[in-house]
Image (spheres, coloured by chain):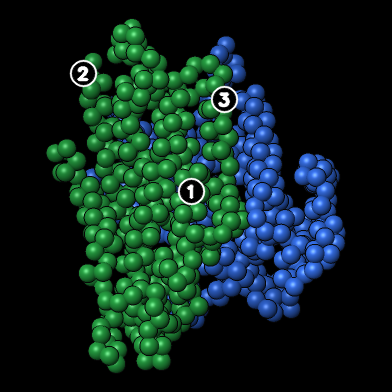
Chain colours: A blue, B green
Amino acid sequence: MQRMLARRALSGIAVVAGVVTLTFLLLHAAPGDPAERLIGPTATPEQLAAGRHALGLDRPLITQYGSWLARFIRGDWGTSFATGRPVRTMIGAAWPATVRLVVLSLLLSYGLGLAVGAVQAAYHRRRLDTALSVASVTLVALPGYWLGLMLMTVFTYLLRVLPAFGAAGYDADYLSGWARFADGARHLVLPLATLTLIGVGAAARFVRGALLDALEQPFVTAARAKGITTAQVMVHHALRHAMIPVVTLLGLSLPALFSGAVFVEAVFAWPGVGRVLVEAVQARDYPVVMSATAISAVLVVAGNLLADAAAGLVDPRLRSVDAGATP
Amino acid sequence: MNVVLRDRRFTVGLGLVTLIAGLAIAAPLVTTGDPNAPGDIVATRFLGPLARDVHGSLHPLGTDRFGRDVWTRLVYGARISLSVGMLSVLLSVAVGVAIGGLSGWWRGWAGVLLLGATDFVLALPRVVLLLLLAALWQPSALLVVLLLGATGWMPVARLVHGEVRALAVRPFVEGARSLGVRPLRVLWRHVLPNALTPVIVAAALGVGNAILLEAGLSYLGLGVQPPTPSWGNMIASGRDTLVNAPWVAAAPGVMLVLVVVGCTLLGDAVRDVLSRQSAVSRQGH
C-alpha cells in the first residue's frame, strides 16, 4: 500500500510539473503581448521594449522558465502584471474560499448521493427508482452557471432572502463573531447549493450502479440465506462493497468539481482560485496564471492521492497487496 | 435492436435529440427573421413570452435587450451547439481510436509511451486547460471544436486500448496474421471494428458533455462570439437582465438540459443493452 502510494505521489509530481511546463509554453506560444496590454495601444516601440524588459519578457524562453521555476519553488511567486499585488497574497487569500466550497459540496453531494442511490437500489425498477433516476439525470445535465443564475433569480431577486455576490457582506468587518459567521453562511448557501445539486446527480447514479452490482454478488446471496433482513444486507454487506468504487470516484470527481467551481465562482463572484484564474487568463496576467494553474493542479493531484489512501481504508484487501509476492 | 427499442430511456433520449436536431435543421422554417439583426429596439425590447409586438408578430419566448426574438436565436443557437458538440466528439473519437488502437497493438516501448502520454493528459485538469487555451487565441466556434477534441480523446483511447489488448490474443487475429495480412491492416480491418461498441456509448455521453463545455466557454466569453447565437452566450447576455427579463437566460438553459438529458439517456440505454449482450455471449462460450 505504501509503495503504491509512493508511486502515485511520484506520478502526481510528474503531472504537476507537466501542467506547469505546458502552461508556460502555451502562454508564450500564444499571440498577444502582456506589455502592450499593460501600456495600451498607443505605446511606442521604445516604451514596449522597456515594458517587456521590466517584465523580464525579453530574455530567452528557457531562462525565463528556469528562473520562474526556481523562484516558484522557493515560494517567490512574483507580482501580478495586472494588479501589481504579490501573486502569493492573491492566491493565499483565494484558495481557502475554493477549498471551503469544494470540500463542503463534495461531502454534501456524496452524503445525499449515497442516501438517494441506496433508496433507488432498494426500490430497484419500481416507480420511486424511476422517478429518482429521471431527477438525477436532469441534475447531471444542468450547467452550473445556469443553475446558479436561476437560483439567484428566485432567492435573491424574487424572494429577496439570500445574497448573490461574494463571500461576505460589505459590513462583515464590523460584525461580531456570531453575526459574522451567519453572514458568511448566508453568502455560502447559493454557491454551495448550486455545486452540490450538480454533484448529487452524478453521485446517486454511480452509487445506485455500484449497489446493484454488489447485490448480485454471491456473498449477498449467502448473507440472505443466513436469514438477516434486507436492511442489514444493504448496510453491512452491499454498501460496504459498493464503497470501494464510490471512494475511488470521490477522488476522480475532484477535478470535475473544481471545474464546476470555476464556473460557479464566476457566477457568484466567489473570491476563489477559479475566479482569480478566469480573470488572470482574460488579462493575460502570466505570473498569476502560472501560479493559479500550478495550485489547481496540486489540489487535483492531492485529491486523487487522498482517494487512493481512503480506498485502502475502506477495502482491507488493498492494504495487504504489498505483503503478497506480486500485486 | 428490438431490445434497445423496448427501453424507454432509448426512445425518450432519441426523441429529444431528434426533436432538437430537427428544429436546428429546419431553423428558417420554424422561425421568423434574422437571429442576429437587432429589432425595433424601442418597440420590441424585453417583451415577455407569448407577447405580440406592435408589428403584430408573436414572440413565443419573448425578446432580448436588442428586441431580437429569443425563440429564433434559440433555434439558430441549436445549430451551433449541436454541431460543435458532434464535431468535437468526432475529433476526439478519431484521435482516441488512433492512439488507443496503436498503444494496444504495439507491445514494445512505443505502446507504453503512447499509453503513458494518454494517462498524463488524462490527469490534467480539463477546464483549466480549456480556459487557458480558449483565452490565448482568438475565440471562435472552430477553436472550440479543436480544443474540446484535443482535450477529450483520452477516455476513448483508454477504452480502445483495453479492447484491442483483449482482442489481439483472439484466434481470428492469429488467423488473419498467418494468412500474411500486414499487422496494421489486421488492426484496421479486423481488430478495431470489434473494439468500437463501447466507443459508441462514450461518444453519446461525450456529445452531451461537449455541448455543456461549449456553452460554459461561450458563457465566459471565450467561445462563440456574439452576435452569433450560442446557448452559452445567450445565457451570459441574459445574466444582466435577470430581474426584468429572466426568460432571456432561462430558455437556453432549458434547451441545454434537454439535449444533455437526451444524450445521457441514449448512452445509458445502449450501454446496458451492450453489456447484457456481452454477458449472454460470455455465458454461451
Contact between marks 1 and 2 (CB within 8 A): the answer is no
Residue furthest front in the image: A45
Marks 1 and 2, how far apart in space?
43 Å
* On screen, residue B199 above or below A46: above
Camera-near label (1 vs 2) is 1
Q: Which residue is mark 1?
A: B146
* On screen, residue A229 above or below A253: above
User: Within 10 Å of the Cα at label 2, are there few (<14), some (14-19), or many (20+) other Cα atoms?
Assistant: few
Q: Earlier in the sequence, mark 3 or mark 1?
A: 3
Which residue: 38% across, 88% down? B40
Q: Which residue is mark 3?
A: B113
Q: Earlier in the sequence, mark 1 or mark 2?
A: 1
Camera-near label (3 vs 1) is 1
Q: Chain of mark 2?
A: B
Contact between marks 2 and 3 (CB within 8 A): the answer is no
Q: Which residue is mark 2?
A: B284
Q: Position of residue A209 (x, y in %)?
A: 35, 40
Element marked by disc 3: helix
- Quarter of the image with the C terminus of chain A is top right
- The answer to whether any part of residue A269 appears in the image is yes
Element marked by disc 2: helix
Quarter where residue A282 is shown: bottom right
* On screen, residue A204 above or below A285: above
Quarter where residue B46 is shown: bottom left
